[in-house]
């Protein structure tokens, strides 16, 4: 079982957008032992609404007897900046006011998230990461990291992700932010429960982007062919919105994380995407999902062709972007050779 840790950073942390924190606390999970130099390290970067314990959200891949067994390799996963499951984001207490930051937290980019991850790496004394991987925004982090620290990461997996955010993705993110703003309690920011109705709606919007026409029609068909008003898919959307709220995910963290998604661009300040990818030294595995509408296979094929040492794979699925959580056998077959 992975072990939870916290470290307090007492030095200023500067954000790419110009913000600053004088101090912060970072939350992360590791294998339940002290890291020993030379031990094989697998670093997992979690997805948008995940947390630093991948045994919670990826139990088919991480855990005793699974592909990434904490007893066999040293597993690390850091809670992203702005995640409500960490201690550094809009939901955490601003020491200057004694209240949550809410909308006063610095706007956070993917590079900021990776810089915080690097602080954890240094704290643990890890100089070489044998395998780094992450799905979705976890893939954003992995892509940025292999460019920011090219000598540190030996192998990297980019799973259902992209080198740059697209207008299509940003349109979904802005629609979700509009849903949050439509809830007056979000803008009031009186307590951490502000914006819960908007968050439910935002999650419903996001879910449509994660799934597909075929997937919904397969799983959410009405049981009665003579039903008057279809409700099964509607009920499912309401359930998923409530489920996120029940997991203590707050609207302010969600707001900030959507902007983090929009910040993704490995080419920014580096002479463009192609030049940035050409600097990657890690052996890379690029994996797309055939039905992923957020990050279509063509984008990832182009990424694999640009990186010097990259192999490309596709996972067949009718479930779109969320296929990385569902198509476990296909994914395990690709990943297993990378840790042997």
Image (tube, grey):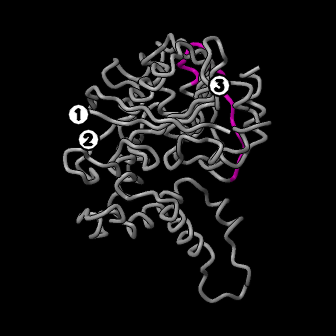
User: Which is closer to the viewer, label 3 or label 2?
Assistant: 3
> Is residue 291 visible in this depiction of the protein?
yes
Q: Which residue is mark 3?
A: 74
For the N terminus, give its image quadrant. top right
Counting residues from the start of the chain, the first of labels 3 and 2 encountered is 3
Are circles 3 and 2 on residues that touch, CB within 8 Å? no
- State the CA–CA distance, disc 1 to disc 2: 7 Å
> Which quadrant of the structure image shows residue 70?
top right
Q: Is residue 130 left or right of residue 6?
A: right
Q: Secondary structure at mark 1?
A: strand
Are circles 1 and 3 on residues that touch, CB within 8 Å? no
- The segment highlighted magenta reads 304-318
Q: Residue at x 61, y 57 (%)?
A: 212
Image height check: is 288 above or below 103?
above
Are circles 1 and 2 on residues that touch, CB within 8 Å? yes
Q: Residues within 10 Å of mark 2 (few under 14, many from 20)?
A: some
Q: Which mark is residue 59?
A: none
Q: Position of residue 200 (x, y in %)?
A: 45, 66
Q: Secondary structure at mark 2?
A: loop
């Amino acid at each position: 079982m992975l072990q939870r840790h916290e470290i307090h950073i007492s030095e200023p942390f500067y954000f790419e957008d110009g913000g600053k924190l004088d101090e912060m606390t970072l939350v992360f999970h590791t294998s339940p032992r002290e890291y020993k130099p030379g031990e094989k390290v697998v670093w997992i970067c979690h997805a948008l609404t995940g947390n630093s314990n991948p045994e919670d959200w990826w139990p088919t891949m991480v855990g005793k007897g699974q592909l990434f067994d904490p007893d066999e390799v040293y597993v690390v996963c850091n809670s992203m900046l702005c995640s409500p499951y960490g201690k550094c984001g809009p939901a955490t207490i601003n020491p200057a006011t004694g209240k949550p930051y809410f909308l006063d937290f610095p706007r956070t980019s993917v590079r900021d998230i990776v810089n915080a991850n690097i602080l954890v790496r240094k704290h643990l004394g890890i100089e070489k990461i044998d395998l780094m991987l992450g799905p979705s925004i976890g893939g954003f982090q992995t892509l940025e990291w292999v460019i920011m620290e090219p000598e540190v990461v030996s192998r990297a997996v980019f799973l259902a992700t992209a080198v740059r955010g697209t207008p299509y993705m940003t349109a979904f993110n802005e629609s979700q932010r509009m849903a949050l703003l439509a809830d007056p309690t979000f803008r009031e920011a009186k307590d951490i429960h502000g914006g819960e109705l908007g968050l439910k709606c935002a999650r419903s919007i996001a879910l449509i982007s994660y799934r597909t026409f075929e997937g919904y029609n397969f799983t959410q068909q009405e049981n009665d062919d003579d039903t008057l008003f279809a409700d099964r898919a509607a009920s499912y959307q309401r359930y998923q919105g409530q489920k996120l709220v029940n997991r203590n995910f707050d609207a302010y963290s969600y707001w900030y994380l959507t902007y983090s998604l929009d910040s993704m661009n490995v080419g920014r300040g580096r002479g463009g995407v192609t030049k940035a990818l050409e600097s990657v030294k890690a052996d890379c595995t690029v994996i797309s999902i055939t039905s992923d509408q957020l990050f279509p296979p063509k984008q990832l094929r182009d990424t694999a062709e640009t990186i010097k040492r990259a192999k490309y794979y596709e996972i067949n699925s009718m479930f779109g972007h969320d296929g990385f959580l569902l198509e476990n056998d296909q994914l395990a077959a690709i990943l297993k050779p990378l840790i042997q």
